[in-house]
Amino acid sequence: MKPTTFPVAFQGELGAFSEEAVLAWFGSSAEPVPCREFREVGDAVRDGKAAAGLLPVENTLAGTVQPSYDVIAEPDFCVVGEVILPIRHFLLGLAGSSVGDIRRVISHPVALAQCGRFLSTHRELEAVAVYDTAGAAREVAERKDPALAAIASFRAAERYGLSVLESDLQDRSDNQTRFLVIRRTDTDAIPEESARPDAGWKTAVLVETENRPGALVAVLLPLAREGVNLSKLESRPGVTPWNYRFFLELEGDPGGEAVARAMADVAKVAQTVRVLGTFHPWRGVSPQ
């Protein structure tokens, strides 16, 4: 008998935005598995402690989450989905506290970066980076210091019994984070992996080039010739010094004629090419 729930690893503690993204994609079939570091998400999936993992890859304000790409690049994994989650940040403190009582604010560095306007207008607050937003909320609850607050989600406030001292600290109201869902390449499909056949496709590709003039241009030209839209391009250090690997996300399926022709030409000019996965663009409704 197949299990009715799927353990899904994410970076952070229960109450983190990543947990919300897990539930948005898997729904009630998910059993969220907290991990302290991004690489531990990969370890949990590789070791079979989780059937899948979820990693944040970019935010509309703070940009790329580079450690996630280093996990995704590992050959054990394939990409099977994406989630785009609206991000609302709240200032959380002890019951009875007010903004005027706070002297130190703790949160994940990416969350602090998304709330720069709030922090710049409250110069009296010392902003301190910690490893997770929900972990920051838990620390505030445990330390019981009325001068300490966390920037975290409303879900974290509910989980750790904190009060919302101020809402919507993010610099823009359309603040969003995009996550990718991974599983081991040698396992079967997981829930929702192919549940929306009419939603279109995206393909994630990892390409490594030589360190020479025009190497990246040579990779991109076949896509332009075939009319394949490139929706994401990210570089990371390659396996040898001063060579680089590029993460590309394309609109389309490698089985389609245009994408297949383009990828065949890319393979002729790149050192290595690996398709990381094909998945549906996010069309879901994320929890607020």
Image (cartoon, helix red, strand yellow):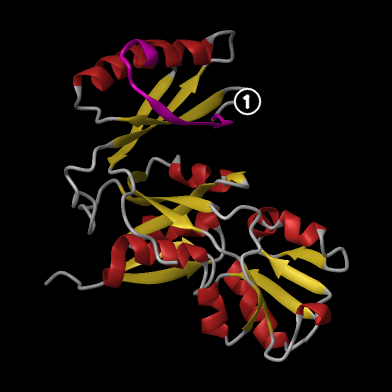
Kindly identify the residue that appears in the image at 52 percent across and 83 percent down. Answer: 158
Q: Is residue 167 above or below residue 57?
A: below
Residue 206 x, y percent position in the rendering = 42, 30
Residue 31 x, y percent position in the rendering = 34, 72
Q: Nearer the viewer, residue 188 or 143?
A: 143
Residue 53 x, y percent position in the rendering = 39, 57
Quadrant position of residue 154: bottom right
Query: Circle 1 is placed at which residue position?
Result: 241
Outermost residue to the right: 124
Kindly identify the residue that appears in the image at 52 percent across and 68 percent down. Answer: 16
Outermost residue to the bottom: 96
Q: Is residue 51 above or below residue 275?
A: below
Q: Quadrant of the N terminus?
A: bottom left
Query: Callout 1: few (<14), some (14-19), or many (20+) C-alpha neighbours within 10 Å?
Result: few
Residue 97 x, y percent position in the rendering = 74, 87
Q: Is residue 185 above or below residue 160?
A: above
Tell me: 189 left or right of 109. left
Kindly identify the residue that appears in the image at 50 percent across and 52 percent down. Answer: 177
The stretch of residues the image draws in magenta is: 224-238
Kindly identify the residue that appears in the image at 57 percent across and 46 percent down. Answer: 65
287 drawn magenta: no
For numbered disc 1, what is the local secondary structure?
loop
Outermost residue to the front: 173
Identify which amino acid the numbered label 1 is placed on: Pro
